[in-house]
Amino acid sequence: MIVDLAGRPKGTLIMESRAHRTIYDGCVFARGQGATMQRFRSGDVATLEKLLKEATARPVMVCMDGVNSMTGDVPDLRVYARLCREYDAVLYVDDAHGMGVIGERGPAETSPYGMRGNAIVKHSGETYDNIVLVGGFSKAYSSLLAFLALPTAMKDRLKVAAPTYLYSGPAPVASLATVWAGLDVNEKRGDELRGHLYRLTAKLLGHVRGLGLHTLNVDDTPVVEIPISAEHDLIEVSERLWRAGQYVTLAPYPGVPRDEIGFRIQLTAAHTDAQVDELNNVLTSLAKDGALRPAIPRQRRPS
């Protein structure tokens, strides 16, 4: 889809440095079709604006994550959307990890995650003008379906230009059924579950920060990466967690920078307070042994 929106004709792709590997692969493929590819550091709005000003190959698309898959950070989408509209660029946002968790804000919300779990565009109070939202059901809904939310003109173009749409078959019935059931749960008690998830996440992050440990998560989403100290081996740390009954996702180099090698904790609404307490006890033990990287001052995001 990135190719069809920006690679034909030869356009410009400006990719955030921490964007998911799937976005990177799409941009590289589009570059092979003739598009120009540029990159900017996450949060570096000044560099992004410079690249937008200098972009001469049209159309222009800025590609980034919503809730980041490793740091758990939530970008200020209003800033990126404003810049893209000012310079007539399309903002492509993959919010696989935000869909089902964060959503529109309102007085009835049960947590800062907002309501309805309808992803980062609604969470930011934005419209879909000049925005392509890629959302999926593989995380919060544990199914195989995905979707696009985008302006009608772009939708009509993709229907006749995107091979992945033209040559795909029907969605599996089982996937449709699980998403339908998930939407039903979301409608009936989704905000209650999101409130519970936020409370568990706050308990975990409060403990991590209280121990003086480094975590890349500053926005209190349930994706919590914890780097290990340089003197320890990631496999040994992960096996220690496993023996203690804790399953985590590893974050090895080169998937992350060397000073961020560690593991990712992914809380869900199915977890309990007792389980988070057990996890916190294990993290305390690892911290006492010096296996986890101590906290470092975090620079403010460029505005």
Image (cartoon, grey):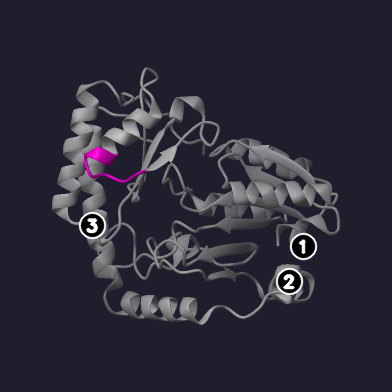
Residue 193 horizontal/vertical position (percent): 26, 66
Is 186 left or right of 256, judged from the image as shown? left
Residue under label 2: 158
Residue 271 numbered mark, or none: 3
> First in sequence: mark 3 or mark 2?
2
Q: Residue at x 34, y 63 (%)?
A: 114
Chain part drawn in magenta: 242-248
**Which residue ends up furthest to the top in the rendered image?**
231
Marks 2 and 1 close (CB-CB < 8 Å): yes
Is residue 260 among what the camera can see?
yes
* Secondary-structure class at tag 1: helix
* Chief SS of the magenta region: loop
Q: Quadrant of residue 291?
A: top left
Residue under label 1: 4
Name which residue type carries label 2.
Leu
Residue 84 numbered mark, or none: none
Q: Residue at x 47, y 36 (%)?
A: 301
Residue 30 horizontal/vertical position (percent): 77, 52
**Mark 3–mark 1 distance (CA, rounded to whole Å):** 41 Å
Q: Quadrant of residue 127?
A: bottom right
Q: Quadrant of residue 182?
A: bottom left
Marks 3 and 1 close (CB-CB < 8 Å): no
* Secondary-structure class at tag 3: loop
Is residue 217 among what the camera can see?
no
